[in-house]
Image (cartoon, grey):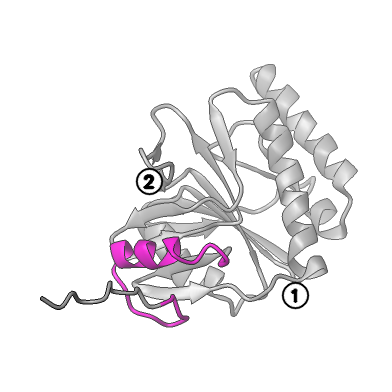
């Protein structure tokens, strides 16, 4: 009897049309690939990330969210974690915040996020990127409550809130501060963030946390 050679899974390629289970099988055989996503059944693989247009903005966002996480029991901050949203969508957002108990998402037995986290942040190249088009539609349909997109080439930061089945922009107040609807005390000095003034960003966040603790 002639034994058939073991089947070899083909590698992931940009533009592949796959089911989520097939996407996961192929991704698991490619440890050298650091970021691949399935958006509406299509595979998207990230290009190498630049320092000033992605790495540094990402670090600023993580510093801001990390300080809030440290001051807020019952939530979880994750960096580049895989999120299983539905049968055709498995994303890997730059950052997310989730409510650990009785929130919208859970952690699966194999250690992935399942279901929509309450807040997602993506670092995008521009308004023409997938983050503000296909991915935004996917997050809205799956009811990610707050979706933040930093368009580094455009020098802009969009904060979307889910309301009645669609995303609406959350505008900064008269002091230039954006205040989360879902996470009390999560305040962002948007102009300071865009300008690289991390000290001011963290000072405003601390003000928001103090306001929350005082019942504001």
Quadrant of the drawing holding the N terminus: bottom left
What residue do we see at 26% from left, 76% from top? 5
Check the picture and name the quadrant holding the C terminus: top right
Q: Residue at x 74, y 69 (%)?
A: 152
Q: Nearer the viewer, residue 22 or 46?
A: 22
Gap between marks 2 and 1 measured at Cα: 31 Å
Name the residue beneath numbered marker 1: 153
Residue 188 visible, this orientation: no
Is 105 contained in the magenta span?
no
Q: Is residue 47 left or right of residue 110?
A: right
Magenta stretch, residue numbers: 11-33
Q: Residue 13's spot in the image, x, y percent?
A: 45, 80
Query: Which mark lies nearer to you, 2 or 1?
Result: 2
The percent position of residue 60, horizontal first and vertical second, equals 78, 51
Left/right of residue 71 with respect to residue 90 in the rendered view: right
Please say if 60 is above or below 110. Answer: below
Query: Which secondary structure type mostly characterizes the magenta part of the structure?
Result: loop
- Horizontally, is 138 left or right of 170 in the view? left
Q: Alpha-carbon neighbours of circle 2 within 10 Å: few (<14), some, or many (≥20)?
A: some
């Amino acid at each position: 009897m002639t034994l058939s050679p073991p089947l070899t899974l083909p590698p992931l390629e940009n533009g592949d049309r796959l089911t989520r289970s097939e996407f996961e099988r192929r991704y698991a055989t490619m440890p050298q690939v650091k970021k691949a996503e399935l958006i509406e059944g299509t595979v998207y693989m990230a290009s190498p990330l630049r320092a000033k247009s992605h790495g540094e903005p990402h670090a600023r966002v993580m510093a801001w969210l990390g300080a809030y996480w440290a001051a807020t029991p019952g939530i979880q901050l994750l960096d580049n974690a895989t999120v299983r949203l539905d049968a055709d969508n498995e994303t890997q957002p730059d950052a997310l915040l989730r409510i650990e108990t009785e929130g919208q998402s859970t952690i699966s037995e194999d250690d992935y996020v399942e279901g929509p986290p309450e807040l997602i942040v993506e670092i995008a190249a521009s308004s023409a990127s997938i983050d503000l088009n296909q991915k935004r539609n996917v997050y809205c349909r799956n009811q990610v409550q707050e979706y933040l997109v930093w368009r580094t080439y455009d020098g802009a930061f969009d904060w979307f809130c889910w309301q009645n089945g669609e995303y609406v922009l959350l505008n900064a107040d008269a002091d230039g501060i954006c205040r989360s609807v879902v996470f009390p005390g999560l305040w962002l000095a948007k102009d300071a963030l865009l300008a690289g003034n991390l000290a001011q960003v963290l000072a405003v966040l601390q003000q928001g946390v103090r306001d929350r603790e005082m019942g504001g």
